[in-house]
Image (tube, grey):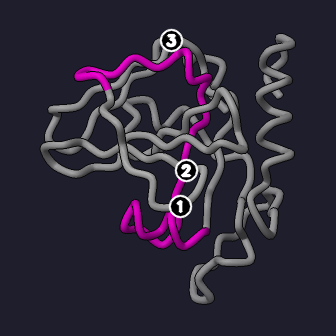
C-alpha cells in the first residue's frame, strides 16, 4: 500500500520513456505473483504489481488493443521497447495491474500478499510474513477493490 506521504497522481514509464502512465488514485493493493505467465511476461522470477482502479489510468500514448494469450487476461507492452505496462483480468473487474518496477513511486508501494505461491520457483526464498495464496488470490484482491470503494484502504 502507499505510504502516508505518497499522494496521487502516481506515474510510470517504460524503459525507453516512449510510454507513460498516470494514475489519478492511490493503489488498491499491491502483490507478488509467482505464476508462470507473469514470470514470462516480466522476465523475472516473480512479478510485483500494484492494482489501481482502471478508471484512474491515463496512458500516453493510449494503450492499444494489447495481447491476450490466456483466456480472460489482457496485457500491454510498450510498442517501442517491449516493457510490460499493464494487465487486466476478467475475474478482477475494474482493476488494472501495473508492474511495480515501472512506477516512479515504487518505493512507496509495498506488496501486501503473494498470489500463485504454489507456483513459486523452488530456489526463490522470500522471508516475509505476507499472506500466501496457492492460486490467484482473487477473493482478497476483489475485497481490496470493495474496501477502496467504501473509503477504507483495505
Magenta residues (range): 35-62
To which quarter of the image does residue 44 belong? bottom left
Mark 2 or mark 3: which is in front?
2
Q: From mark 3 to mark 1, how far is it between C-alphas? A: 29 Å
Residue linked to disc 2: 73
Residue 122 lies, in percent from the top left, at 62, 88
Residue linked to disc 1: 70
Residue linked to disc 3: 24
Q: For residue 59: magenta?
A: yes
On screen, residue 44 versus residue 28, left or right, reads left
On screen, residue 138 versus residue 80, left or right, reads right
On screen, residue 5 versus residue 112, left or right, reads left
Give the residue displayed 35% in from the left and 25% down from the top. 21
Q: Residues within 10 Å of mark 2 (few under 14, many from 20)?
A: some
Q: From mark 1 to mark 2, how far is it between C-alphas? A: 6 Å
Q: Residues within 10 Å of mark 3 (few under 14, many from 20)?
A: some
Q: For residue 55: magenta?
A: yes
Q: Secondary structure at mark 3?
A: loop
To which quarter of the image does residue 69 belong? bottom left
Give the residue displayed 43% in from the left and 47% down from the top. 75
Q: Nearer the viewer, residue 74 or 37?
A: 74
Badge number at residue 104? none
Q: From mark 2 to mark 3, how far is it between C-alphas? A: 23 Å
Q: Secondary structure at mark 1?
A: strand
Residue 61 lies, in percent from the top left, at 23, 23
Q: Nearer the viewer, residue 54 or 133?
A: 54
Give the residue displayed 58% in from the left and 57% down from the top. 71
Amino acid at each position: 500500500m502507499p505510504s502516508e506521504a505518497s499522494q496521487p497522481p502516481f506515474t510510470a514509464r517504460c524503459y525507453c520513456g516512449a510510454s507513460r502512465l498516470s494514475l489519478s488514485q492511490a493503489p488498491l493493493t499491491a502483490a507478488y505473483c509467482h505464476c508462470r505467465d507473469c514470470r514470462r511476461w516480466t522476465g523475472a522470477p516473480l512479478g510485483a504489481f500494484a492494482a489501481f482502479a482502471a478508471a484512474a489510468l491515463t496512458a500516453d500514448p493510449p494503450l492499444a488493443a494489447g495481447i491476450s494469450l490466456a483466456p480472460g487476461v489482457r496485457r500491454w507492452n510498450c510498442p517501442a521497447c517491449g516493457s510490460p505496462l499493464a494487465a487486466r483480468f476478467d475475474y478482477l473487474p475494474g482493476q488494472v495491474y501495473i508492474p511495480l518496477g515501472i512506477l516512479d513511486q515504487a518505493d512507496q508501494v509495498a506488496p501486501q500478499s503473494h498470489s500463485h505461491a504454489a507456483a513459486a520457483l523452488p530456489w526463490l526464498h522470500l522471508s516475509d510474513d505476507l499472506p500466501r495464496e496457492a492460486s490467484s488470490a482473487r477473493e482478497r484482491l476483489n475485497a481490496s477493490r470493495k474496501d477502496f470503494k467504501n473509503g477504507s484502504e483495505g
